[in-house]
Image: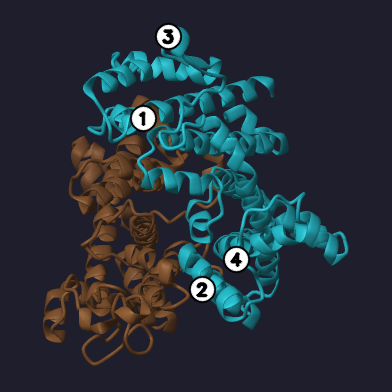
Chain colours: A brown, B cyan
Amino acid sequence: MTVAGSATLPVVPAAAGGDGRTAALRRLLVRPAVAASLAVIVLLVVVALAAPLITGLTGTTPTAFDGSAVDPALGGLARGTAGGISERHWLGVEPINGRDVFARVVWGTRVSLLIALSATALSITLGTAMGLLAGFLGGLADAVIGRVMDLLMSFPSLIFMIALMSAAPAVDRELLLVVVLGFFGWPYVGRIVRGQAMVLARGEFVEAARALGARRRSLLLLELLPNLTGPILVVATVSIPSCVATEAGLSFLGVGVRPPTASWGQMIASAVPWYAADPAYFLIPGGFLFATVLAFNVLGDAVRDELDPRSGQR
Amino acid sequence: MILYLLRRLAAAATILLIVCALTFAIFYLMPDDPAQGACGKACTPERLAQIRAMLGIDRPVTDQFFAYLRGIVAGRRYGTGAAAISCPFPCLGFSFQTNQPVWQLLTDRLPVSASISVGAALLWLAVGVAAGVLSALRRGSLWDRAAMVAALGGISLPIYLTALVLQYVLVVKLGVLPYPRAVPVTADPVGWAQSMLMPWIALAMLYAGIYARITRGEMLESLGRDYVRTARAKGLPERTVLRRHALRPALMPVVTIFGMDLGALLGGALITESVFGLPGVGKLAADAITSADQPVIVGVTLFAAAFVVLANVGVDLAYAALDPRVRATG
């Protein structure tokens, strides 16, 4: 299992100096694909932060029903074209109850990004701490942490997440999603940090610091951690889109974010019975989801290319 | 090698045991009372107590857990005397909804999941590896860039979105395919292939992208190796160099993730099966979740975990067989 996983492990150089990093950043930004995906991400973050303002301006809310926008004679299908796109409802309305799709997508962005970013933050924190301890201390700590990571990574995590989410009592669903996603994500961070920490711990600068009488804690936090920002950045950019996709998948299956809170995956799920009559209803949240995941994936790919000489084969 | 196999199997059994314990703990310690679910609407306290005794959930949790484990390896009997229900090996309990044995539900649905996953796997393996090799050979070309953009796009597509778009275009708009339905391949091969085509494409779009990227990266790496230069220098035909010296080592990691991906899918392509309404193991899980059918959810989780874990063992063994260094350190 350890062999299996290491095949796709990005190996990042231990020491990327400050100058190298700004140069790498500049090289990244001139790539059109990277610039475009960064623009998409910035836009999404703005939308997520300003969701109440935006829906305040359009005068819609994600939960208000609008019976006048749907046609009972057509079984509750939206009036007008493309799912009822109109001046009032920019992206149409839901069939039957007439909730505004634009408002739901905007608030869904907030939910989606909040969960993905928090879950990534959690898995990065846990993974970095565990990986540092395992790689730096070695011995028993390494063996125990390594075993736990192996176990978690060979777990059928999706089905287990589904089981867990479906059985969970009525607690904050968003918080639960963050905890579950973060918990199953940290071993991937931990494995990479551990490998890097093992190499770094043998470095001369660590030895020098130790000779100067540095404590273990300051060795870890002041000597090792700053040298790990590269690999951590790489795993973070890979982790965000996977969290977005997993959250949407879980919500699609009905075990993630619950109504009335809007989420893209859940919107697509509720569009499934209508897909033939009202394709816009699944294409709109689906398009947002796809664009978000793609933008983060393009960015993550480019960041890895820059920071990881092994994959920098362009 | 035997020792290695035994050690691997022991590790797999440990993981399954832990999955079992955790799943069990989640479902049997939750506030939802499984007896209440089995009892139904017209429930009396006496009947509830009776069901509790029958399911064995009036006993301590550890007893229940060991009874469940014993059921898996040796079968078990629910209740006592004439009213007892026998649940033969491997016993995963009975569905609250249909009262069928969970094991029977799983094995009934496995052929559908197997049809979907094996077909899709062959498709994505062929497309992904071919695209990856071509990209590596023509690195930096228009083909390479287009293929890698397509791969990234495929990876970013949520499978349910692909599935809905496919079904909308191919079935509703163009009418070139019928709605997917579960037909055994032996009864109606054409109908089977028609039903499976969309799930295959939907899954393959996701995985082919991953495989193309990995194959390309590994292939580029092995092309830069000394032994490839040596092979060329000693005058081997370019075809042989590529096939034997570059592609073969490049495919090792591909084989690894292939085993694991296939294992995961055999335990139920949950989303794909749900969207296309195909009654595989994944659909069983999705339905069980909707109806809070706890024995089925626990059963599917274990079943899927077993596939993942066994696929891991299979991959490790393949590695050990191909690379003697692994045996020593594994």
Mark whose residue sits in front, 3 or 1: 3
SS label for mark 3 = loop
Q: Are marks 2 and 4 in contact (CB under 8 Å)?
A: no
The residue at 24%/78% (across/down) is A100
Question: Mark 1, residues whose alpha carbon is within 10 Å: few (<14), some, or many (≥20)?
Answer: some
- Residue beneath disc 4: B179
Q: Amino acid at mark 2?
A: Val
Q: CA distance from mark 1 to mark 4?
A: 38 Å
Q: Secondary structure at mark 1?
A: helix
Instruction: Between residue B214 and residue A57, name the one nearer to us.
Output: A57
Q: Residue lying at the far bottom in this picture: please name it.
A: A87
What residue did someone put label 3 on?
A: B80
Amino acid identity at mark 1:
Leu
Q: Which residue is mark 2?
A: B165
Mark nearer the N terminus (1 vs 4): 1
Cα distance between the residues tagged 2 and 4 = 13 Å
Q: Pointer 3: residues within 10 angstroms few (<14), some, or many (20+)?
A: few
* Residue A122 image offset from top left, x and y in percent: 25, 50
Q: Which comes before the other along the chain, label 2 or label 1?
A: 1
Q: Chain of mark 3?
A: B
Numbered tag placed on residue B22 in the rendering: 1
